[in-house]
Image (cartoon, rainbow, N blue to C red):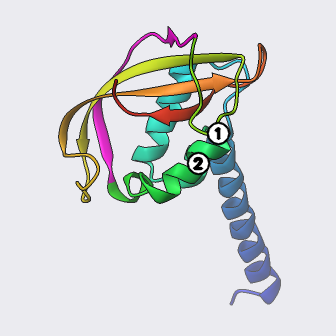
Amino acid sequence: MVSARVVVWFVLAALGVVLLAGCQDDEKRAALPASAPPQRVVAAYIDAINAHDRQLGRQLSTQRFAEQEEKVVDSLFDDAKLSDVEIEAPQTESDYESPDGKRYQEAVNVPVSFTLWHGDESSMPNGPTVWGYILVRAGAGQPWRINDAGVG
């Protein structure tokens, strides 16, 4: 016969394993270091879309882009799968004007191509896609954040 003390010990041990696993998941989702280059930020954002992780997507975005995501492209986080991803070198955007009028010290365009599959094709059709992300930062040493997306 198993004593109540042994059962309690096993329950507490199992709870500890679950809590530890949860902490490790948080570490995996931790924001990138401020020194992460623009291509790595875009790769992490695409990983967030594939993982349906809106929270991480917002962490990698400016407030303006995160708010836009909620209205326009948030459906990508529902069921989208991006494959065959190719991220190109960033191109300096010397005269970039943010849609919200905010000025940034640095801005780059990161061209991306991928194959998109998702249920809501109203904004983006399924299949091969040529895309790009505009990343900005307030100054050297500050993290790059996605502020805009699209083509052209």
* Residue pictured at 66% horizontal, 63% vertical: 18
Residue 91 forms part of the magenta stretch: yes
Q: CA distance from mark 2 to mark 1?
A: 6 Å
Q: Residue 27's x, y, as percent?
A: 69, 42
The overriding secondary structure of the stretch rendered in magenta is strand
Q: Do the CB atoms of the residues marked 2 and 1 lie less than 8 Å apart? A: yes
Across and down, in percent, residue 6 comes to 77, 79
Q: Which residue is mark 2?
A: 66
Circle 2 — which element?
Answer: helix
Image quarter where the N terminus lies is bottom right
Disc 1 residue type (three-letter) = Thr
- Mark 1: few/some/many CA within 10 Å (<14, 14-19, 20+): some
Residue 5 vertical position relative to residue 61 in the rendered view, above or below? below
Question: Which amino acid, mark 2?
Answer: Ala
Residue 39, position as x, y percentages in the image = 51, 19
Q: Left or right of 102: which side holds 43?
A: left
Please state the extent of the stretch shown in magenta in the rendering. 80-94
Task: Name the residue furthest right.
Answer: 5
* Residue 111 found in image quarter: top left
- Marker disc for residue 62: 1
Q: Is residue 6 left or right of residue 107?
A: right
Please rate how many residues cluster around mark 2, counting C-alpha atoms within 10 Å: few if below 14, some from 14 to 19, many from 20.
Answer: many
